[in-house]
């Protein structure tokens, strides 16, 4: 498993690829056919029937392929919410993005360097299959990260070119997550003397708690926030556990929060602002909203990472 880092590693020793927002899985092909297992070892073969058929079409006797099951949105980017629906309702929307090869035709490849494993893997996968090869992205690490963030992808994974395959956490694979800004409803502010303050937030219009966000150390922002909280003080939401150090607010106060993209829970979240009351039900900001135009030039049956490739070709970087 890749180790989470704040910035991508630099230098020619590293290869970089887009981090897809899906389910990490392994395809195992043998004499009995093909099966697909989750990261936790669950057999999901029956859930991925179309992918299993695609795996049977690979020209191998036996193999273990590591990758990610994904679904694409209209921009060609992986969409986790759509993936969860597709597993039960729209099997034909599923793709398997392959990024490593552990075994092939009786040979254990885990001690082979990554660059060589990937070269063999690329030769096994056709361009018209539901199993696609995850291309490495050329260029300098910071430039790649800037583009991936702008295109609305979850982040990037950097791997040492000479790394061997090992299960479990490793520093030979590093992931750098991108951030997104979403609009929530402020429930209250939790603060204790000598400790950082946190804004408790909910999905807009629901009062359903989703997590907390760090309140900036900027004094002016903290004072402005606290004044607003006191002006709109209210009762705690229903079913909310007691929090003695929290000042609750009335419904309808907006809160803009920056947080890691592609996470089910709020992680590394920080409050950006809170302001006008929400009129009716507001929706979350689009997490995948790209700052660069992404031109859809290919059919949905094409490679899942083509959306980011198009962005690479068309992006006009700011001065």
Image (cartoon, rainbow, N blue to C red):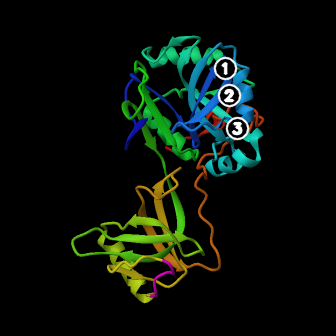
* Residue at figure coordinates x 49%, y 57% from the top left: 265
Tell me if label 1 and label 2 are in contact, CB under 8 Å: yes
- Asked if residue 6 lies left or right of residue 125, the reply is left
* Residue at figure coordinates x 69%, y 24% from the top left: 55
Residue denoted by label 1: 125
Report how far apart the C-alphas of labels 2 and 3 lie in the structure: 17 Å
- Asked if residue 257 lies left or right of residue 292, the reply is left
Report how far apart the C-alphas of labels 3 and 1 lie in the structure: 22 Å
Magenta run includes residue 65: no
Q: Residue furthest front?
A: 32
Residue denoted by label 3: 46
Count residues near mark 2 (Cα–Cα under 10 Å), then give few for <14, some for 14-19, many for 20+. Answer: many
Report how far apart the C-alphas of labels 1 and 2 lie in the structure: 7 Å
Q: Secondary structure at mark 2?
A: strand
Residue 196 vertical position relative to residue 234 in the rendered view, above or below: above
Tell me if label 3 and label 1 are in contact, CB under 8 Å: no
Count residues near mark 3 (Cα–Cα under 10 Å), then give few for <14, some for 14-19, many for 20+. Answer: few
Q: Nearer the viewer, residue 177 or 309?
A: 177
Q: Is residue 130 visible?
A: no
Residue denoted by label 2: 131
User: Which percent across, then down, holds residue 292?
Assistant: 60, 46
Q: Secondary structure at mark 3?
A: helix
């Amino acid at each position: 498993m890749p180790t989470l880092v704040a910035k991508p590693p630099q230098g020619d020793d590293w290869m970089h690829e887009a981090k897809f927002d899906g389910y990490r899985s392994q395809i195992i092909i043998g004499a009995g056919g093909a099966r697909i297992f989750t990261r936790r070892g669950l057999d999901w073969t029956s859930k991925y029937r179309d992918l299993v058929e695609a795996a049977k079409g690979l020209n191998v006797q036996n193999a273990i392929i590591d990758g990610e099951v994904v679904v694409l949105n209209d921009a060609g980017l992986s969409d986790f919410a759509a993936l969860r629906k597709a597993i039960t309702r729209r099997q034909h929307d599923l793709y398997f993005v392959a990024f490593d090869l552990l075994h092939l035709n009786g040979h254990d490849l885990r001690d082979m360097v990554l660059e060589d494993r990937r070269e063999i893997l690329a030769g096994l996968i056709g361009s018209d299959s539901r199993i696609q090869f995850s291309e490495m992205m050329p260029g300098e690490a910071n430039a790649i990260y800037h583009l991936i963030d702008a295109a609305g992808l979850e982040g990037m994974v950097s791997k040492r070119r000479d790394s061997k395959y090992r299960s479990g956490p490793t520093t030979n694979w590093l992931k750098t997550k991108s951030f997104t800004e979403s609009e929530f409803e402020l429930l209250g502010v939790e603060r204790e003397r000598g400790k950082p303050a946190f804004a408790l937030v909910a999905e807009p219009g629901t009062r359903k708690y989703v997590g907390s966000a760090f309140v900036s150390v900027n004094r002016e922002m903290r004072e402005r926030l606290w004044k607003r909280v006191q002006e709109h003080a209210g009762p705690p939401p229903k079913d909310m556990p007691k929090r003695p150090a929290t000042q609750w607010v009335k419904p309808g106060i907006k809160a803009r929060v920056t947080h890691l993209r592609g996470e089910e829970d709020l992680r590394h979240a920080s409050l950006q602002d809170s302001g006008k009351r929400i009129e009716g039900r507001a929706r979350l900001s689009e997490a995948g909203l790209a700052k660069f135009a992404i031109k859809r030039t290919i059919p949905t049956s094409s490679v899942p990472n083509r959306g980011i490739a198009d962005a690479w070709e068309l992006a006009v970087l700011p001065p």
